Amino acid sequence: MGRESVAWEVFEHEHYHEEPEWYWVLGIIAVSGSIASFLLGNLLFGILILLAGGTLALYSTKEPSFLTIHLSKQGVRFNKEYHPTESITSFSIDGDKLLIEKHSFWHPLVIIPIGEGVPHDEIRAVLGAKLPEKNHKEPVGHRIMEHFGF
């Protein structure tokens, strides 16, 4: 008989401390882009560029939250979010990430970081008891945002 559950704790994402120069470059790019947009007569896009730059600057200062992940044959729980196995179509492990495909139009792929020392075969044993394992890949946009520290 296989394992009934697996649990671990991990940070939501890796946090990179940005140097002050990074914020200056972000500000210069955002202001330049919005000025160019204003000069071309697109006021709304210029405002959107400024808002996006400000949001990016604020988000980069946010420390990642600590996640407690618990996998069982009944479902997947991380912090207060719970996904029963009935709402999950399949799962896969891509490097150090657990990818869960759900029956959802708006958020079909949940990406959960796997902590160090958590054996992949234990995750497969617990989830594989009720769910098929497919070959999902982490979306390119997610990898790009992670590369830049978001």
Image: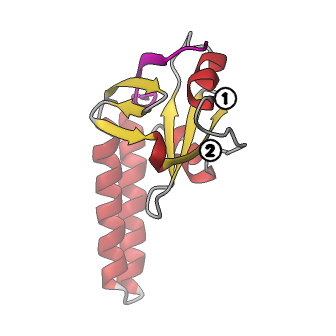
- Looking at the image, the residue that sits furthest to the bottom is 41
Q: Quadrant of the C terminus?
A: top left
- Please name the amino acid that badge 2 sits on: Glu
Q: Which mark is residue 59?
A: none
Residue count near mark 2 (Cα–Cα under 10 Å), binned few <14, some 14–19, many ≥20: some
Q: Tag count in the figure?
A: 2
Residue 3: x and y in percent read 55, 14
Residue placed under numbered mark 1 in the picture = 95
Residues shaded magenta: 1-17
Q: CA distance from mark 1 to mark 2?
A: 9 Å
State whether residue 18 appears in this view: no
Residue 106: x and y in percent read 43, 62
Q: Are marks 1 and 2 in contact (CB under 8 Å)?
A: yes
User: Residue at point 36% right, 31% down?
Assistant: 78
Q: Quadrant of the N terminus?
A: top right
Q: Mark 1: which secondary structure?
A: loop
Residue 108: x and y in percent read 50, 55
Query: Taking 115 as reference, is 44 left or right?
Result: left
Is 99 included in the stretch rendered in magenta? no
- Please name the amino acid that badge 1 sits on: Gly
Residue 80: x and y in percent read 27, 34
The numbered mark, 1 or 2, whose residue comes first in the sequence reads 1
User: Residue at point 66% right, 29% down?
Assistant: 95
Residue placed under numbered mark 2 in the picture = 138
State whether residue 68 appears in this view: yes
Is 14 included in the stretch rendered in magenta? yes
